Amino acid sequence: MSISSRFAVGIHILTLIELNKEGVTSSEFLASSVNTNPAVIRKLMGMLKKAGLIEVHPGIAGAKLAKELSDITLFDVYKAVNVVQEKELFSKHENPNPACPVGRNIQNTIEPLFTAAQLAMEKVLRNVTIEDVVKDIATKDNIC
């Protein structure tokens, strides 16, 4: 199982809004880049707007970033698109057999490991901004 693609698409949306800031970044335009349905993009844009990351106005095509690139971290996007709940990145299997020593103890053994791994990943996401993503893409594609 992997993290929802909403996270990657959210990053894609924010990056494309920045790189297309001279044009109109409509849900149809974004959907063509993501290769998905505009309704999916509109749903994610609603989540990004609610989190204060973008500005959109009903009936008016286009979106713009609500914050500076350097102020939007990948952790902000991760939280905005509801990828996972607090301490729930890793799922544990339900109802292990309590008559078995492993079944009886596995949950308590792996839960702190899973929590530590999620916190470590989230720490990395807090240290990468949309500005970093935009610069990397611009360098790779000779945009700037």
Image (spheres, rainbow, N blue to C red):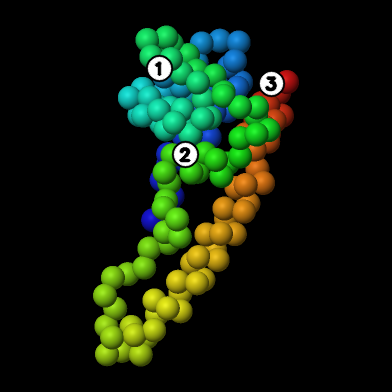
Do we see residue 75 in this rendering?
yes
Task: Say what secondary structure mark 1 lies in.
Answer: helix
- At which x and y percent is residue 131? 67, 32
Vertically, is 88 above or below 33? below
What residue lies at 56% left-to-right and 44% top-to-bottom?
A: 75
Q: Residues within 10 Å of mark 1 (few under 14, many from 20)?
A: some
User: Which residue position is annotated with label 1?
Assistant: 28
| Residue linked to disc 3 | 143
Q: Position of residue 85 (x, y in %)?
A: 41, 53
The residue that disc 2 covers is: 80
Q: Amino acid at mark 2?
A: Ala
The numbered mark at residue 120 is: none
Q: Earlier in the sequence, mark 3 or mark 1?
A: 1
Kind of residue indicated by mark 3: Ile
| Residue count near mark 2 (Cα–Cα under 10 Å), binned few <14, some 14–19, many ≥20 | many
The nearer-to-camera label among 2 and 1 is 2
Between marks 3 and 2 in the image, the one whose residue lies nearer the viewer: 2
Whole-number angstrom distance, CA of label 3 to CA of label 1: 22 Å
Residue 35 visible in image: no
Q: Residue at x 65, y 34 (%)?
A: 71
Quadrant for residue 93, please give it. Answer: bottom left
Residue 133: image location, x then y, percent = 64, 35
CA gap between label 3 and label 2 equals 28 Å
Residue 94: x, y in percent?
28, 70
In the image, taking residue 120 as reference, residue 81 lies left or right, namely left
